[in-house]
Amino acid sequence: CEKVCGTKVGCSNIAYPKLVIELMPVGLKGLMIAVMMAALMSNLTSIFNSSSTLFTLDIWLRIRKNATEVELMIVGRVFVAILVVISILWIPIIQAANSGQLFEYIQSITSYLSPPVTALFLLAIFCKRINEPGAFWGLIAGLVIGFIRMVMDFVYQAPYCGEEDTRPSVLKDVHYLYFALILFGLTALICVVVSLCTPPIPDEKLVRLTWWSRHSRAERVDLVNPCNQSKEAESPKEEPGVDPQTVPEFPWWKQMYYWFCGLSRSPAQNLSKEEREVLERKLTS
């Protein structure tokens, strides 16, 4: 195996591409390569877009509560660029993990990080007793346990064929797929226990948000976001009126900057509180 594909444990990295390139006819060969490239681009764009949105809305807005839309857009794009750099720097770690077998690496990382999210998602849909403290501590505990197992996988390398396995028992005797089931159950147990020990969410705030209340016709009372309350409590500053027809002139380098970032050069319109609520409802519906 090492002579053919460069790894001692197997040639799974080149198995599928070799089948596509050598066995398929010319037309299907190009089609399959295009499908593989499209799938890769789709995965990368979805991951980068979701990560950027989470960072700008859940982290950056807590740091700068009065950030403008232009600032959020720039921060989101800078964060995507940082993620791209981190992804490139992560390649040697992927090559070192699981003896360079990409499929094994993807499956193991998914087994360590996905079960807590899956358990929380299913519980939130099918169990209305789950509340915010239970979801938070269950997710944190599951991710910490999965992260510890992932770090142990990097530290203790799997032995090659014929070598003695001297790794800890949690790595040697528990396959990562079995570990995913254990982590799923442990996260669900923590979510349920913490939720039962804390006050529940009122039923009127869960209308059409769970499986059992999906057909309810009662009026739902929206959950209150503390960040929005603090923003509404602040007195809005009156900005001087600007003629929306007037577009300021910028130097050519600044025009190129606005064009590259996709920013509008027209001045922002002042919206009332009711207009902002209607706009947010349209964007989140």
Image (cartoon, helix red, strand yellow):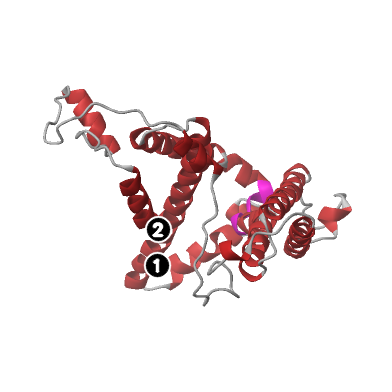
Magenta span includes 69: no
Q: Where does the magenta region start and end?
A: 97-103
What type is the residue that disc 2 sits on?
A: Met
Q: Is residue 2 left or right of residue 268?
A: right
On residue 37, the disc is 2
Q: Residue at x 55, y 68 (%)?
A: 207
Q: Is residue 80 left or right of residue 122?
A: left
Q: Which mark is residue 32?
A: 1
Residue 231 seen in this snapshot: yes
Report the residue at 42% width, 51% height from top: 45
Report the amino acid beneath label 1: Met
Quarter of the image for the C terminus: give it.
bottom left
The circle drawn on residue 220 is none
Image side of residue 217 versus residue 148, left or right = left
- Residue at screen point 54% across, 50% down: 224
Residue 18 point in image, percent of width and height: 49, 64
Report crowding for label 2: few under 14, some 14 to 19, many 20 or more residues within 10 A (C-alpha). Answer: few
Residue 23, position in %: x, y? 45, 72
Residue 285 relative to residue 114: left or right: left
Q: Taken as a whole, is the magenta stretch helix, strand or loop? A: helix
Q: Residue furthest left?
A: 245
* Relative height, residue 267 to residue 29 (above, below): above
